[in-house]
Image (spheres, rainbow, N blue to C red):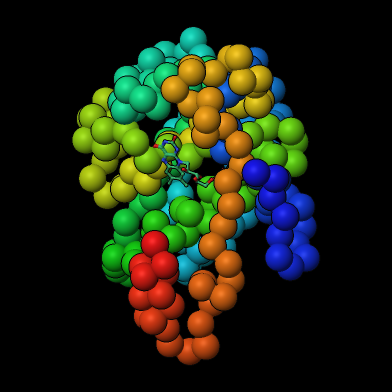
Amino acid sequence: MSRSPDHPINSMFFERWSPRSFTGEAIPDAVLQSAFEAARWAPSAMNAQPWRFLLARPGDEHWQTFIDVMMPRNRLWAAKASALVVILSERQLDRRDERVDNHSHSFDAGAAWANFAHQALLLGWHTHGIGGFDNDAARERLAVPDDFAIEAMIALGRQGGIEALHADFHVGEAPNGRRPLAETVFAGTLDVSAFAEEEEAA
Ligand SMILES: Cc1cc2nc3c(=O)[nH]c(=O)nc-3n(C[C@H](O)[C@H](O)[C@H](O)COP(=O)(O)O)c2cc1C
């Protein structure tokens, strides 16, 4: 499926997609720095910047741990990425003299990940979010303190050809679509009948 937006937007928003075939080539430090820099400028509640990123590159001392904590199916393709990132978010923030719960720590880390993904794309690199990993194992093996949530992992690489990808994933290796705005944006209150109609049609 080729993507075409229903309304005018910058092309980076529909050109970003999540391939599973990666070339495995080395990623320049400058690309990583730019992607993390874009993430750094994301908005966050009280400018708390709850995001933190753990980075591994093929062959370094952390790479195998990052691969090990993934669900086996994700390992089949993500092992050919040029970098893997674990996204953390700090659950609390400082307000006046107090440590208080930050209700938007995950939301804000999501904004940072989107910046990261789009900046990487602008430099010719693709990202693929990964939620399929063992959160407890990641916490233990990467020594993540309890006051940080482990949100997701990211595989980052140059898109490879279909021949470089495990056969199980060939069918899904194409940009997907999106629900229309009419079923996404509501005047004031959520129109649950829109979902009922969807279910009837299914
Ligand atoms: C937080 C998060 C977790 C995801 N987890 C996985 C995963 O474990 N395995 C996988 O193959 N894709 C995973 N994806 C990729 C999504 O399936 C993909 O982003 C979605 O289908 C939209 O497609 P697009 O990114 O190509 O636009 C994840 C994406 C996100 C943002």
> Depth check: 12 or 196 in front?
196
Q: Compared to 7, does 72 lie above or below?
A: above
Q: Position of residue 101 (x, y in %)?
A: 29, 65
**Residue at far bottom of view:** 188
Quarter-of-image position of residue 145? top left
> How many numbered dots are placed on residues in this image?
0
Q: Compared to 96, does 58 lie above or below?
A: above
Residue shown at 72% from the left, 55% from the top: 4
Q: Compared to 185, does 41 lie above or below?
A: above
Q: Position of residue 42 (x, y in %)?
A: 58, 57
**Residue at far top of view:** 59
Residue shown at 36% from the left, 25% from the top: 73
> Depth check: 152 or 74 in front?
74
Residue shown at 71% from the left, 60% from the top: 5
> Depth check: 198 or 129 in front?
198
Quarter-of-image position of residue 196? bottom left
Q: Report the quarter where the C terminus lies.
A: bottom left
Q: Position of residue 171 (x, y in %)?
A: 52, 30
In this rendering, does residue 96 appear at all?
Answer: no
Q: Position of residue 138 (x, y in %)?
A: 29, 31
